[in-house]
Amino acid sequence: MCCNCKKKKKDQKKASKSSLKKSKKSVKIEPPKKLSNHYHPPRPPSHWLLWQTYFTLQCFNDEIYRTRTLNRVIAPFAFSTQIAALQRASTGNTFKFITKLLHVEGFYAAKTFEHDLLQVLQDFPLNTLSKNDVKNIVTISKFVFCNDIKPAEKWQKYITESMKLEIATVKSSEIHEKYKTIQKFLNETIGAEFMVSNEEKLCRKETTLLSIVGTRIKASFANTETYSFKNASFLLGYGLKEKNHPFFIAKGEYANVIFNDFEAWRIPLKQNENLKGNEPKMSLILVRPNCSGNISTTKSTETFDEIAKAINILIQRKRKSATLLLPQIDLPFSNHTTYGITDLTTNWKQSFGEQITSNFGKIADGIFTKCELDRFFHCASIRLSHFGVSFQGDTETTKALSKTNILQPENSHKPKPIKNDEDDNTKSARLQKMIKAQMKIPDRLLKPRRERLYHFNARFDSPFLFFIVDEKWASILMAGCYAGTPALTPNATKRPATAKQLNPELYSTGYTVTVKT
């Protein structure tokens, strides 16, 4: 090989190396791109929410709050404050029962629970009644002492100053005077007038101590359009139907989350717009089991952690447009004359014995080593309607029902109000022209038109749970279960299905709601 060829090869190698160096210098190494700030994983549920959910589902137990059916409505937050106050004054078996009912262990240390409870009570309107009280959340937690019994100073100071609960005394020993005073307190709690035929149902001559606890809420749907809907089937377990249940349609922006066993929806609520101040932000949470027969499992304490996670996610999740089919609810039933007033001690004595409510030796000063809690009145009712959420005895929301639109859907996205009654919307345009022209109409055109299915994002036409939640502290103000009218009994969902119910050809258990067009 000649010298010139060797030089050429060396020059080529040098040129390739220099080009590689230049290319390396020209490449800029950029730092990894930051993740988008639009998505933030939800914060885990707080200890307070986890405990509140467990306590609420525990109160669904028939040993604590008994109903003959699955239908029930309770006020967990107000109830928990009263139970926590009674725990400090109880001894013996009563203390064991109340401690088991609170079930703080596993969620809190004792001092930590007390700290969170007092922190929530500082901002929440307990025992506040005003001229516009029906516009607000009203939560009553009151102790009533009778027959000249005085509450213990140490306990009274803690209850009134730290917990901000109310203590009332009835000096008169006459049963009629006691009855009048207690009836007045109960009327303030439920926001309505009621009468009891037998005075001893409210108090006895020997009554020394009783408690009154209750919640009533009045709040309208936020950013929601409501439409009337025809009476339709409320589907229950294994094809059992209640055929004429009233429904309405809610269209707005809602958040939802789906778990393995249930799905949950959040409907924002707003209070009276004329009131000023920092009103608590509330939401109505609806939890529907994926299988309509699983309502008994969903309302048990085994699902408390998943329901707490669902509430926590829904509070943080962005809302999207959706259309829901909701039942009109009136719990307890409208013919219930006591507006949800229930004496829980009657049930407790039947479940746990007569002495379960007698060991309150720390609650009063004097010679009394035992002081019996004679009555524990729990007051809660709910109405779900076009207006939003209200309570039994409220007359203002019934006026709003006549102003709602009637839905005549043309597709699943654009619900439109129905036309005047003079126009017949069931006949096609061709048929109407033939009628006006007095033409002979073939029989095939006179047949009624097929019903068109209306597709909802969720249909609450089977048993479900509901929770009204204060979003600031994640406190469950009201909760319950709804299973139609007449409601299912707890054993109804455990019955095996018949062959007729399992065969769709013999018995249609259809899960769709239809509207005539």
Image (cartoon, rainbow, N blue to C red):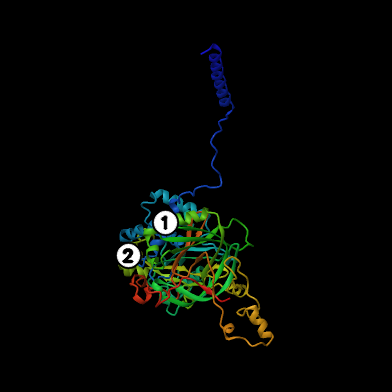
Residue 26 versus residue 58 in the image, above or below = above
Which quadrant is the C terminus positioned in? bottom right
Inter-mark Cα distance, 2 to 1: 32 Å
**x and y percent of residue 209 in the render?**
40, 66
> In this orientation, which residue lies closer to the viewer: 447 or 171?
447
At label 2, the amino acid type is Ile
Task: Decide if residue 89 is in sight here.
Answer: no
Residue designated by label 1: 306
Pair 2/1: label in front: 1
> In this orientation, which residue lies closer to the viewer: 231 or 202?
231
Tally the numbered discs: 2
| Secondary element type, mark 1 | helix
| Secondary element type, mark 2 | helix
Residue 34 versus residue 86 in the image, above or below = above
Residue 9 versus residue 509 in the image, above or below = above
> Which residue is at 67% across, 82% downward?
433
At label 1, counting other C-alpha atoms closer than 10 Å, the crowd grade (few under 14, some 14-19, many 20 or more) is some
**x and y percent of residue 341 in the render?**
45, 71
Task: Decide if residue 458 is in sight here.
Answer: yes
**x and y percent of residue 37 in the render?**
56, 44
At label 2, counting other C-alpha atoms closer than 10 Å, the crowd grade (few under 14, some 14-19, many 20 or more) is many
Q: Are marks 2 and 1 in contact (CB under 8 Å)?
A: no
Residue at the extreme top of the image, as rendered: 3
Q: Is residue 136 left or right of residue 45?
A: right
Mark 2 or 1, nearer chain start: 1
> In this orientation, which residue lies closer to the viewer: 416 or 218?
416
At label 1, the amino acid type is Glu
Residue designated by label 2: 356
**x and y percent of residue 472 in the render?**
52, 54
> In this orientation, which residue lies closer to the viewer: 8 or 2?
2
